[in-house]
Image (cartoon, grey):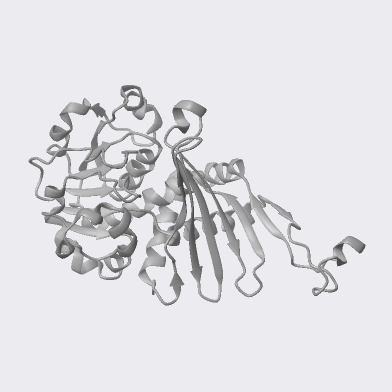
């Protein structure tokens, strides 16, 4: 006989889309930025545990990886995101490069509380993290935004910046001319001119912008994706494409002149731009940046880099936000996925029910 309470909330991709349509895309993004900022403002490493992510990196049947990203708020909830990264997906299969799902667990019992699609949520939380860093480190007032790489992640990078700074215009570059050409259509939420720079002229892009985002699928050993050159003294860069050992988007010479702010120091030293940086160039991590905001706003006139490799804390924040909205709108289904019985010591008792 099943006991009450052993249920799991399942939230599908179409239901997440419905939440965003009802609440409004800008409103959801603003709420996510606020929730993430609040979580970072009270973050303590002893109370929110985020062990190193791990997974499988492989070449067959196609180059890619499947990894898991765990986080636990001690005594309250555990969140584990599983994410697949397969750069060939858009061209060969018509699927996003990143596919993911998040599961939430009760640390008191181990029960699976919720399971939800996280493909869109991963893009949203990555854009929100860059928005938090940009709001603190970028020059105030209207900005010209540059993007190297115009795929799915670039869309939410631009959206995040637009929520914290007025955007004057946008300059983009992508190795695929068709992807660059479609960027204006995919960023309808920012009604600004989109200038496309040929890949060979990316150095010109560096010198023309106030905020730069690198969001590429550069292969190990194939970077950097932009050349060093003249730029505004106050240039802020959100580097989000380096998420594996050996990946590189930014030139070392540029990093050596920057204040580098990792999202998670230990992870960035292995996978991010920080793996090539001198340790004396490393500044505050993202939580410290938020907690000591007034101190680091003084760097708005300097060259700064947000080294964003993706943090499981962000996945926990966005998953719980969506589950809150789902509850308010009556969305999602509740299923009895994990059964309990009258005799927890007898694994066969469910067969006799």
Residue that extends furthest to the right in the rendered view of this protein: 352
Which quadrant would the C terminus be assigned to in this image? bottom right
Residue at x-position 64% and y-position 62%: 113
Residue at x-position 76% and y-position 58%: 336
Q: Against 156, is 310 above or below? A: below
Residue at x-position 29% and y-position 48%: 246
Quick one: 15 or 123, which is closer to the camera?
123
Q: Is residue 353 visible?
A: no
Q: Is residue 325 visible?
A: yes
x and y, in percent, of residue 22 in the image? 56, 44
x and y, in percent, of residue 317 in the image? 48, 60
Q: Against 174, is 234 above or below? A: below
For the image shown, how many numbered marks are present on the structure? Answer: 0
x and y, in percent, of residue 217 in the image? 34, 38
Indicate left or right for 224 with 120 as reference: left
Give the quarter of the image for residue 104. Answer: bottom right
């Amino acid at each position: 006989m099943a006991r009450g309470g052993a249920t799991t909330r399942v939230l599908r991709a179409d239901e997440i889309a419905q939440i965003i349509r009802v609440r409004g895309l800008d409103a959801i993004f603003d709420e996510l930025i606020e929730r993430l900022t609040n979580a970072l403002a009270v973050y303590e490493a002893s109370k929110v545990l985020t062990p190193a992510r791990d997974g499988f990196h492989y070449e067959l049947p196609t180059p890619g990886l499947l990894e898991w990203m765990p986080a636990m708020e001690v005594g309250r909830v555990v969140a584990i995101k599983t994410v697949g990264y397969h750069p060939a997906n858009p061209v060969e299969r018509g699927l996003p490069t990143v596919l993911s799902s998040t599961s939430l667990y009760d640390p008191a019992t181990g029960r699976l509380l919720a399971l939800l699609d996280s493909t869109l949520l991963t893009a949203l939380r990555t854009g929100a993290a860059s928005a938090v860093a940009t709001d603190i480190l970028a020059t105030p007032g209207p900005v010209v935004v540059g993007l190297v790489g115009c795929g799915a992640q670039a869309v939410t990078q631009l959206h995040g910046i637009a929520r914290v700074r007025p955007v004057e215009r946008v300059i983009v570059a992508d190795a695929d001319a068709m992807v660059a050409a479609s960027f204006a259509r995919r960023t309808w939420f920012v009604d600004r001119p989109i200038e496309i720079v040929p890949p060979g002229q990316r150095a010109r892009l560096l010198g023309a912008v106030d905020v730069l985002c690198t969001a590429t699928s550069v292969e190990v050993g194939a970077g950097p994706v932009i050349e060093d050159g003249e730029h505004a003294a106050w240039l802020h860069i959100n580097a989000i494409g380096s998420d594996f050992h050996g990946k590189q988007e930014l030139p070392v010479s540029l990093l050596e002149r920057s204040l580098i702010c990792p999202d998670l120091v230990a992870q960035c030293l292995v996978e991010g731009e920080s793996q090539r940086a001198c340790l004396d160039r490393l500044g505050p991590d993202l939580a410290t940046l938020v907690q000591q905001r007034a101190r680091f706003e003084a760097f708005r006139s300097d060259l700064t880099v947000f080294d964003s490799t993706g943090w499981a804390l962000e996945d926990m924040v966005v998953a719980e936000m969506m589950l809150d909205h789902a509850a308010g709108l009556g969305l999602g289904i509740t299923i009895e996925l994990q059964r309990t019985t009258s005799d927890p010591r007898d694994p066969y008792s469910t067969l006799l029910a």
